Image (spheres, helix red, strand yellow):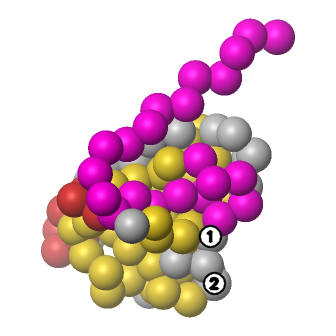
Amino acid sequence: MGLLFVETLPGPKVFKCKLCKVDSASQDEIVSKDFQGRYGRAYLFEKVVNVCLGPNEDRHLLSGLHTVNDVHCSSCQQILGWRYEKAYEESQKYKEGKYILEKAKVMKVG
């Protein structure tokens, strides 16, 4: 078994996995704070780190049908949110390639 590489983010405000405290995203990467996740409020991020993606899955979300991947913390494997792989409605295409992190699963430090 190899060593786990963990990327540490610079800057004063960083989101970390609530369970294991590994960096997950920088506040500078927030696209929107106005999203709903499985467990309440969620943030849409342009880029996240220290995560693994689950398989593609079609889901009917509040904004319509999307192909998504669950986003797991690469350290503790907790599900933190999901990644938008494909949006089927033209008005939702801006989400493709972006990440949802659930406020209940991450903590802001700084």
Q: Amino acid at mark 1?
A: Lys
The x, y position of residue 75, in whole percent, is 69, 39
Label 1 sits on a secondary structure element that is loop
Query: Does 13 lie within the magenta span?
Result: yes
Which residue is located at x 59 percent, y 47 percent?
22
Residue located beneath label 2 in the image = 39
Residue located beneath label 1 in the image = 105
The x, y position of residue 78, in whole percent, is 73, 55
Which residue is located at x 53 percent, y 39 percent?
50
In this orientation, does residue 66 appear?
no
12 relative to 76 in the view: left or right: left
Q: Residue furthest top?
A: 2
Contact, mark 1 vs mark 2 (Cβ under 8 Å): yes
As displayed, is residue 98 above or below residue 54?
Answer: below
17 relative to 78 in the view: left or right: left
Q: Amino acid at mark 2?
A: Tyr
Per the rendered image, the range of residues in magenta is 1-22
75 relative to 96 in the view: left or right: right
The x, y position of residue 4, in whole percent, is 66, 23
The residue closer to the viewer here, 27 or 73, is 27
The x, y position of residue 85, in whole percent, is 39, 50
- Kindly report the distance in space between the C-alpha atoms of the residues bearing marks 1 and 2: 9 Å
As displayed, is residue 28 above or below residue 10?
Answer: below
As displayed, is residue 12 above or below residue 56?
Answer: below
Residue 55 in which image quadrant: top right
Which residue is located at x 55 percent, y 31 percent?
6
Q: Earlier in the sequence, mark 1 or mark 2?
A: 2
